[in-house]
Image (cartoon, grey):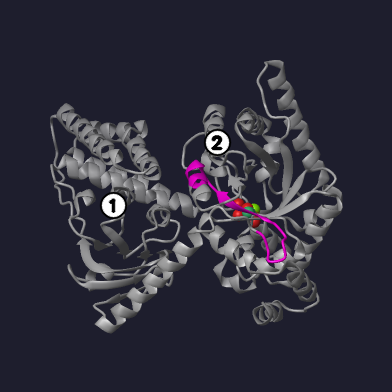
Amino acid sequence: MLKGIGASPGIAIGKVLLLKKEELNFQHMTITDVEGEKKKLHKALEISKQQLEEIKKTSTEQQRSILDAHVMILEDPELISSVEGKIDSEKLNVEAVLDEVLKMFIAIFEGMDNEYMKERAADIRDVGQRLVMNLMGKEQLNLQELKEPVILAAHDITPSDTAQMDREMVLGFITDIGGRTSHSAIMARSMEIPAVVGLGNITEEVKMGDTIILDGKEGTILINPDSSVIEEYAKRREEEEEVKRELRKLVNSDTVSKDGVKVELASNIGNPKDAKKAHENGAEGIGLYRTEFLYMDRSSLPTEEEQFKAYKEVLEIMGDRPVVIRTLDIGGDKELPYLNLPKEMNPFLGYRAIRICLDEKEIFKTQLRALLRASVYGNLKIMYPMISSVEEVRQANEILEEVKQELKAVNINYSTEIEVGIMIEIPAAAVISDILAKEVDFFSIGTNDLIQYTTAVDRMNEKISYLYNPFNPAVLRLIKTVIDNGHKAGIWVGMCGEVAGDQRLIPILLGMGLDEFSMSASSVLPARKQIQGLCYEEMKGIAEKVLEISTAKEIEEFVKLNI
Ligand code: PEP
Ligand code: MG
């Protein structure tokens, strides 16, 4: 059994198709016909774009967005002018020059601190390979034409490979390199194709036609296992499918405990496509739309119109279900290189989120305008991130009011029923939640940051990850305080941090009186099933006892024993 990183859950059993990328050997030659080389470049750019457009025809919407990003790279004026400039100055053949320029671009992205931006180097490498192959007149493997179901094994599955994958023919994939946040991993999850990445040199260890068992949840694979093992996994796969089929029956049911307490199960999203997935998975609303993704992976701020379109799309997908859209939460691990913000010693404690928005008022106002304009298309709620004081809420609300007045003056409609809430993710906000509750319509507890700030444990630092524990009594007490203070003031309290979808903690949160749980789309149905099997009164008693326990470990054990 080999262990890698589980990138997309599920069990797949099948024969290997080894995808070996061709070595692209070309010579470095001095040339005289500078214009001829440039012509070759433009021809290859055109062919590459046509190929991508062709693949797009049979792709899903999410796949198309990746392919669009590839087309954008091919149209990038900086890339094209760098290559042309170098052909002029170095008098080298276009293949050699392009290779050099691509390497430079890839190095820039790989050198970025941010994991997400780092992974974008894969996109440049991918589309660059296509371009060089076309320059050299080489054929590209078309994954849309597979004749029998296979498990793909490759050094790295590129985003355009995933965009061509047919769910019926690709049972799963395994790779030498890659992490959970790579585009291919994200795509695999959204297409529900089981995948294990980062297996080292798996492409050297498997051969064409080997039988493989892949367990995407555990991140493991077995090569040429005995038939008894295959049978065992086939049985497990069938059981998993059965569980999924059973869960699907709950898509339209309410989330009510055995003793009749109803809560809302919502989903966290990063873009309009996620909203579709959330809706299909029975989410009763969107509890957190992380709008910063609209601002990332590009070279300038999104326009009001672009934002308006995205917000409107999400609101329309969700119909009359509530949609909590969070205003820009940039900073920390989410960087925007084009804002040219100075490097900080402690970015998580620095110039970020609402702090930037209150300072760079125009950025904030553009977003608020887009949100207000979109509000007539659904049930919008606006949420401010990283609030640490009453003053920040008041200032943000003043700006919101200003934007409303400006829209009114030019007769642009917006809903008059928009609730405005805040994230409770800084301990200061939790401590004064009784005061904050009087200023807003709802709270959403952001445990990802609340844990990190309460316990002084960097959420990205693996070395101290053992301290990053939602069972920490300090964290649980703060959560309870926030819920109680919200309820005393008559407002609803939700949670959009990862804890909300954690089945070990859901019973305690239910017992504490949490009104709304927001989680990834795939967690919604399992959470609904769990809550439908719980008794609120019983969980209330358990939650009270939990708050008296001294250590995280004891709490975890108590919960395991009693639920
Ligand atoms: C949180 O901090 O819990 C949260 C939901 O926000 P993010 O993960 O985007 O910081
Ligand atoms: Mg946060």
Q: Which residue is mark 1?
A: 166
- Spot occupied by residue 416 in the image (x, y as percentages of width and height): 73, 30
Would residue 30 appear left or right of 368 to someone viewing this image?
left
**Identity of the residue drawn at 21% across and 56% down:** 21
Residue type beneath disc 1: Asp
Would residue 299 appear left or right of 433 to someone viewing this image?
left
**Quadrant location, the N terminus:** bottom left
- Spot occupied by residue 134 in the image (x, y as percentages of width and height): 18, 41
Magenta-span inclusion, residue 270: yes
Q: Quarter-wise, where is residue 170 in the image?
A: bottom left
**Magenta span of residues:** 256-276
Q: Which residue is mark 2?
A: 316
Under 8 Å from ligand 1: the CB of mark 1? no
**Identity of the residue drawn at 73% across and 67% down:** 536
- Spot occupied by residue 99 in the image (x, y as percentages of width and height): 25, 45
Can see residue 486?
A: yes
Is there a contact, CB below 8 Å, between mark 1 and mark 2? no
